[in-house]
Amino acid sequence: MGQKSKLVGSFREAVADIPDGSTIAFGGFAMPGTPFNLIKALWEQGAKRLTLVANTTGGAQQPRMPDIGMLVENGQVAKVICAFTAATRPTDVLPFTKYYESGEVDAELVPQGTLAERLRSAGAGIPAFYTPTAVGTELAAGRETRLIDGREYLLEYALKLDYAFIRARTSDTLGNLRFHRSQRNFNPVMATAARCTIAEIDEPVLPAGSIDPDDVHTPGIYVHRLVQVPPEPEGIWPTRRQEKRR
Amino acid sequence: MGQKSKLVGSFREAVADIPDGSTIAFGGFAMPGTPFNLIKALWEQGAKRLTLVANTTGGAQQPRMPDIGMLVENGQVAKVICAFTAATRPTDVLPFTKYYESGEVDAELVPQGTLAERLRSAGAGIPAFYTPTAVGTELAAGRETRLIDGREYLLEYALKLDYAFIRARTSDTLGNLRFHRSQRNFNPVMATAARCTIAEIDEPVLPAGSIDPDDVHTPGIYVHRLVQVPPEPEGIWPTRRQEKRR
Amino acid sequence: MSESKSKGLNRQQMADRVAREFQDGWIVNLGVGIPTMCSNTDIGDRDITYHSENGVIGYGPVAPAGQEDLNLVNAGGQNVTLNPGAAMVHHADSFGVIRGGHIDATVMGAYQVSMTGDFANWKLKGQKGGGIGGAMDLAACAKRVFIILEHVTRDGSPRLVEACDLPVTARGVVTLVMTNYGLFEPTGTGFRLREIAPGLTVEEIRAVTGGTLTVADGLRQIPTA
Amino acid sequence: MSESKSKGLNRQQMADRVAREFQDGWIVNLGVGIPTMCSNTDIGDRDITYHSENGVIGYGPVAPAGQEDLNLVNAGGQNVTLNPGAAMVHHADSFGVIRGGHIDATVMGAYQVSMTGDFANWKLKGQKGGGIGGAMDLAACAKRVFIILEHVTRDGSPRLVEACDLPVTARGVVTLVMTNYGLFEPTGTGFRLREIAPGLTVEEIRAVTGGTLTVADGLRQIPTA
């Protein structure tokens, strides 16, 4: 077992070598499991022409946290692959939307389950698969479908990543991870899909082998760099959501 | 959350209603996680024309444990879908082999990873997927392949089950399962692929909600019947493997 | 969806009526908005497992203020509680639950439902992009798709239509439509009114419903107690 | 594979030489038989993570008698131990590790290897069915495929051949071939002898090797201490 610690000293150091043009996924669903500190570090680092992958571009909720929208506003983003380019409530306007509508940033809108499965497939060496999702919709227009046992399915391709930014509750120095509750979400599948996975960790990183092998959610072989999240205000943590005024 | 206990009183009761012609998978890889007690109960129950799915047909090792070979010898099996119709060591002869060679029982030989993925796909609503495994081999002869990014892949279909027989270390009354070490193997994916999953449990079944939600390996929604494994000699447990004389 | 004053049932009453469709042992996914309110309804001793797209199986009511776990949310981002026997899975496994056909019913909001069971809820007219989330997966794969929506738009046009003129989320999947005017089923050539809201007449409803409105034998009024 | 007395290296010596190819940080899958013995070899402070098809990531040596965990086995069914930092996954995730290209090297036994890097290890001539296990997944997807086999069959025929006449496990994937006679690489038109076992000559090996045998500059003898 690789026994060298993957802990690096700062978020800045963890993202320092990320080149322009990279494809980077951000875990998280609403606040839980979102790598706010790594996203902020990427904003400070300034890499450009990025393709970003996440459930949403962010900014629908208050308070505003580091999100794809911030990187878009900072001129770092060429394309976004996500399940929401607009908010669920049409009256909420995402910061991202005007950049998308003006054509400044490209987007690929993907159903959430298809997004998760395309990431899982990338990690698991499945180059393409069929799904019933989105058949008969605008998203399937002009695309390849196939009849299997009398039902129509849409062909979808694996989505490979250069980097995955994820967040977990617990880790040992080898990157064996545990997530707390709905922190888990996209994080484990993104970790498998990336050439380099960087994880921010809530609790003090434990010595190698501190986590029972039956209790590991993401094996350390999928995690390449770890950063300890410092307490507030230096570190960014999930907060209570404030209802937006309507 | 469904709060009714899924515990049934005996292995006999758990398999009583399985009809002739069913497709049934057995979890397990070598001894760990193999539902020996349920296999024995199915042998006693006598259902016929079964299609059985497992890693191997069994019988390569000593002592002999309840396995597919036993059901074949009992005239219950029409077809086997597995990764081994012969042993790894060609000098070992499996009890199954003569039934297969005589044409009495049919078999579909599937690479182990493809078998696991076909089961996972059945549970996850993916009707078909592409894999690099077995391309260029006899198993791919005459079958559909596809070039993706310059590499050739083989089309594989989901493998749906009527029943899954599995074995776990720990369960609560709702069927939330935990496996110990390599007991896990095929069991979680088979559970998702079946209309009805029956699990034999090593440790006394716990009250609903005794397992922390972060620590559940197989959610109870995938488990329909539980049977407590009694101590030996009534219950069948993994034993030390004896080296066969060569 | 709208907060305009409208006839018939209020939001919680619509959610209540839909919740009473849930059968013992069902696994149910509730969408953002009114559908979320289904979990507030008392439906006796029926055991329902609530599933959320982000991998929460078996969640309970929203957490009381001050007792939230900030790392536990439902699909709407609310901090919920867990029922005994809950389990967490990752996103790919969570959509395995959905796509694999393990969800007995999904309840969603929508802009429009058609008489052939199509519905639209991810994209407005002329919008670039939209908000799909898990709606297309749920719509295509749940055993039953229940839609809750206001019966008419703010300008009084029907939302139960012959054909959706907005981009659809899925085709031919809706089994039940709950509006503030009543409970309906798409019939292919129109809608069948199963139950009617207090204070409304069949003729009033027919005037603002697309296709042919048929009425169930012994039409019942929806109890709102 | 055979237990017949044969020239050159013994089984453990073949395993030892292959193990010395493993680089720091590699994830390695060891097949049943001689390959398993690679984990006995002392390769200094290089960190190797051993992966087994049944979902064990980071296993260690075989458990001492009396200390076995009967619910923990490697791919060969032996009761192994776990190294600190091990993790368990299910079978589909375990083959996700393999198919996803996360295995740096797989070591397998075989009946035959061809000069184009094909190999055969799942089916004998004339056999109905066979024993595939995880071999085809590993062969198609590991970054490096290392094969260990006796240099000749019991009747003295080459196992390093121009073309396999047994059904292949995968085509064009073998990067290194270890036999009791030496360490080889398939070249497309034959085999390149990288290192030679003590007590053998190049001419002896050439006589029982398919295709053109080339010899590495400054051919080294394999240390067997």
Image (cartoon, coloured by chain):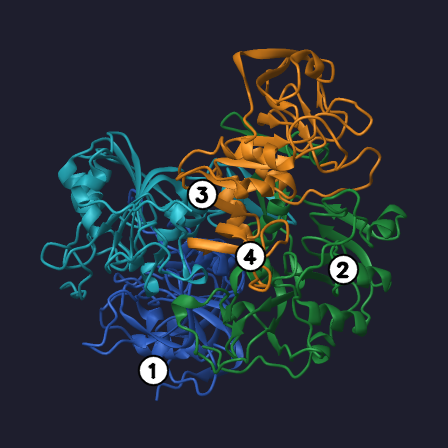
Chain colours: A green, B cyan, C orange, D blue
Q: Which residue is mark 4?
A: C63
Q: Which residue is mark 3?
A: B123
Hey, what amino acid is under mark 3? Gly
Residues at discs 4 and 3 both on one chain: no
Task: Specify few, some or many for label 2: CA neighbours under 10 Å numbering under 14, 14-19, or 20 or more.
Answer: many
Q: Determine whether label 1 and label 4 are within 8 Å by CB.
A: no
Q: CA distance from mark 2 to mark 3?
A: 33 Å
Residues at discs 1 and 3 both on one chain: no
Of marks 4 and 2, the one in the foreground:
4
x 27%, y 69%: residue: D79
Chain letter of disc 4?
C
Drawn side of residue D98 relative to residue B19, left or right = right
Hey, what amino acid is under mark 2? Ile
- Location of the N terminus of chain A by quadrant is bottom left
Residue C144, placed above or below residue A118 = above
Secondary structure of the residue carrying tag 2 is: helix
Q: Which residue is mark 1?
A: D199
